[in-house]
């Protein structure tokens, strides 16, 4: 079974290939291209913020009450770093930033000593720490 980091690298390599193909092929996008673009656009629209590509730190700030694809991605990352166990929290990845997600974020922030402290808000420093722990370790 591939690790999340391997799937991430494969997905982004595929996404870059898809983007290059879309630029060369023109407006006739495949279903995979359309899905990827739709997910990215939905994340941008929900938070009114520019969402960057894999090599940059996201600027989306998530906190209690946030919902959507960005929260689902956060929850998957929290599972990957061990801030929460799927066995202990069934249904954790639901796209809703509630109490379970808040507690997992605080646990992660304390565990890696995120700059700014463990406030339960996923901002620049928390995203940076998550990306470093999930995708580059």
Image (cartoon, rainbow, N blue to C red):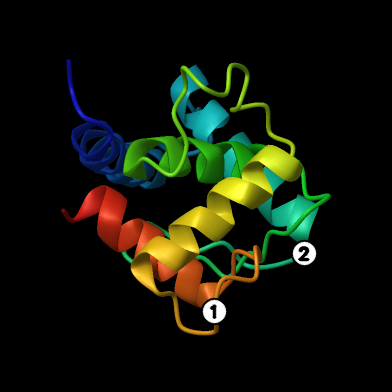
Point out the residue furthest to the right here.
65
Residue 87 lies left or right of residue 24; in this view the side is: right
Please name the residue shown 35% across and 37% down the image.
80
Q: Could you tell me if residue 16 is visible in this image?
A: yes
Residue 87 lies left or right of residue 8; in this view the side is: right
Circle 2: is it few (<14), some (14-19), or many (20+) Cα within 10 Å? few
Circle 1: is it few (<14), some (14-19), or many (20+) Cα within 10 Å? some
Image: 122 above or below 99 = below
In the foreground, 24 or 1: 1
**Which quarter of the picture shows residue 123?**
bottom right
User: Which of the two labelled residues, at mark 1 and mark 2, occupies the earlier sequence position?
Assistant: 2
Q: Position of residue 45 (x, y in %)?
A: 76, 53
Image: 34 above or below 128 = above
Please name the residue shown 60% across and 27% down the image.
92
Q: Position of residue 81 (x, y in %)?
A: 34, 44
Quickly name the residue at label 2. Answer: 48
Quarter of the image where the N terminus is located: top left
Quickly name the residue at label 1. Answer: 117
**Which quarter of the picture shows residue 116?**
bottom right
Q: Position of residue 19 (x, y in %)?
A: 37, 44
Query: Dot 2 lies on which element?
Result: loop
Query: Dot 1 lies on which element?
Result: loop
Please name the residue shown 83% across and 50% down the image.
65
């Amino acid at each position: 079974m591939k690790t999340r980091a391997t799937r991430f690298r494969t997905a982004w390599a595929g996404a870059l290939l898809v983007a290059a193909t879309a630029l060369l092929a023109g407006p006739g996008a495949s279903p995979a291209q359309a899905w990827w673009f739709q997910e990215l656009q939905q994340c941008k629209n929900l938070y009114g913020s520019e969402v960057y590509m894999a090599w940059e730190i996201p600027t989306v700030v998530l906190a209690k009450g946030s919902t959507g694809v960005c929260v689902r991605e956060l929850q998957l990352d929290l599972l990957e770093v061990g801030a929460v166990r799927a066995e202990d929290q069934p249904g954790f990845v639901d796209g809703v930033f509630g109490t379970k997600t808040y507690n997992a974020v605080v646990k992660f922030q304390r565990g890696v000593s995120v700059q700014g402290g463990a406030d339960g808000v996923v901002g620049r420093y928390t995203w940076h720490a998550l990306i470093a722990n999930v995708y580059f370790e």
